[in-house]
Amino acid sequence: MRLYELTAAELAGLMVSRQVSAVEICEDFLARSEAVEPLVGAFITRCPNRAMRAAQAVDDKRAESERLAPLAGVPIAVKDNICISGLGTTCSSAMLKDFVPFYTAFAAERAERAGMVVLGKTNLDEFGMGSTCETARLQSTKNPHDLGCVPGGSSGGSAACVASGQAPLALGSDTGGSIRCPASYCGVVGLRPTYGSVSRYGLVAMASSLDQIGPMGRSVLDVALLFDTIRGIDERDATSLASPYGCVADALEGGIKGLRIGLPREFFDVVSPQERDRVREAAVAFERMGAHLVELSLPTTRHALAIYLALSTAEASSDLARFDGVRYGHRTEHFETLSQLYERSRAEGFGPEVKRRVMLGAYVLSSGENYYERAVSARRTLRAEFSGAFEVCDLILTPSTPTVAPRREEMGDPVKVYGGDSCLVSVNLAGLCAVSVMCGTVGTLPVGMQLIGDAWQEPALLRAAYAYEQFAGGPRPVARRV
């Protein structure tokens, strides 16, 4: 039996029935990683010895008939902007290449306390700034479905890790689509939860009003189980909130008959014909399952990317100001004055994309044109449009990305790269929840559809995604190209 081909829920069931041990599962995933990681490059750091100790601890507890969490013994990979005590957290940047935190992020802490086995830290666009994983400075990650294509970003390592069978589950973060974009490109399930549902404590900030940690996996049930594990209020994060519902994984059954699903024309206007066709076919599938389709217009979403770039770069300029070579992070060896220390440390530590966004953010904040205030006002208008849409529909269906995964050599134009997030950033701006699920292919490459729900509508959102997944034949298999 190839354990790495099973879903997290299936692995958990095998452990509960004592058909397989956590150590055996860990060994199988470590062996799979040894075989395919040289091709995929999903990990920045792997910790096999730590993982084996954690797996053995779960087996010991199970042998003593201790009550364990649903995902105890299941392996997980963690994006390398989420801190874990004793493991390097680099954000794939020379600025933090030697940083080892002494604390663990809330989400990772919840996963480890539930008995999950951390296999390592996954690659990302530097400081989460990108949608291809090509701005990463410490590691190159490839799409498991076609090694000549990008895996998406910024959580590209997490998506590629899951798609290639190196871990059944992974944690990512989503500031402007950074979970859903790679989920779409790599053909996995990625959930961007409601802002505040998962604590950001221990997440290296990119844009604090937009950042959100979320789960990635090969099935909707797996993602729901991990979301139930990591969500919850945290006194260390003033923006975290208690979820107003119980176990999401227990509420996936029941179907979607009578559900109203909106189709906003603006999202379908910006995607390739092949993407549009696959998502329209998914809409027909929802209709066959008993849902009602509602045509919508969300005009401000046409400007969402501009709003997002103004706000996210302004916040990034502020959030990354602490990396100055004084307290931690890269420090230049050649300086005579304090100004030179700041300038040279940042120039050497940050890559081109981070510099571009920091400078753009500084301009947004300092310009006399009031770009920041205008973007905040437009964000309120966008939120109001979504609120109005959710009065006539329960969920919204859109493409996840304008195209399937691009080839790596096509990623030289930053403006073109930014356009890859055009279907995604509205969710972050409005503080909503959304999930990307595979809904077909173009050639060998996956196509993702995005379901969007109002704030705190994860139960309905994941129930609809689960219904579609079952209708389409169940969870997607591990990528066969590696």
Image (tube, helix red, strand yellow):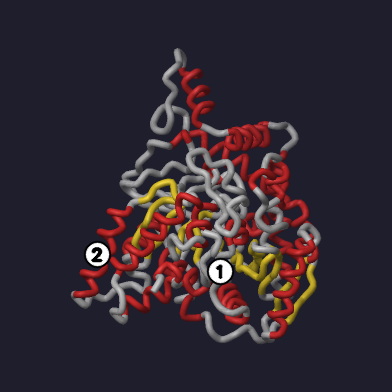
Quadrant of the image occupied by residue 442? bottom right
Check disc 1 and give the amino acid type. Answer: Trp
Q: 399 left or right of 323? A: right
Query: In the rendering, at what x and y percent does residue 425 appear?
Result: 66, 54
SS for dot 2: helix
- Rounded to the nearest whole Å, what is the CA distance between mark 2 and mark 1? 36 Å
**x, y percent for residue 430:** 64, 58
Seen at 24% across and 74% down, the residue is 62
Number of marks in picture: 2
Residue 273 at least partly seen: yes
**Circle 1 residue:** 456
Mark 2 or 1, which is nearer the eye? Answer: 2
- Secondary structure, mark 1, is loop
Amino acid at dot 2: Gln
* Residue sitting at x 54%, y 52%: 156
Residue designated by label 2: 56
In which image quadrant can residue 182 be found?
bottom right
Q: Nearer the viewer, residue 417 or 308?
A: 417
Is residue 142 positioned above or below 344 on the image? below
Residue at the top extreme of this rendering: 336
Q: Dividing the image into 4 quarters, which one contains the N terminus? A: bottom left
Q: Is residue 142 left or right of residue 444?
A: left
Q: Are marks 2 and 1 in contact (CB under 8 Å)?
A: no
Q: Which of 332 and 187 is in front in this view?
A: 187
User: In the rendered structure, which disc, 2 or 1, sits on the residue that comes first in sequence?
Assistant: 2
Q: Residues within 10 Å of mark 1 (few under 14, many from 20)?
A: some
Q: Tell me what residue is drawn at x 71 percent, y 66 percent.
A: 398
Residue at the location (35% across, 43% down)? 101
Left or right: where 7 falls relative to 476? left
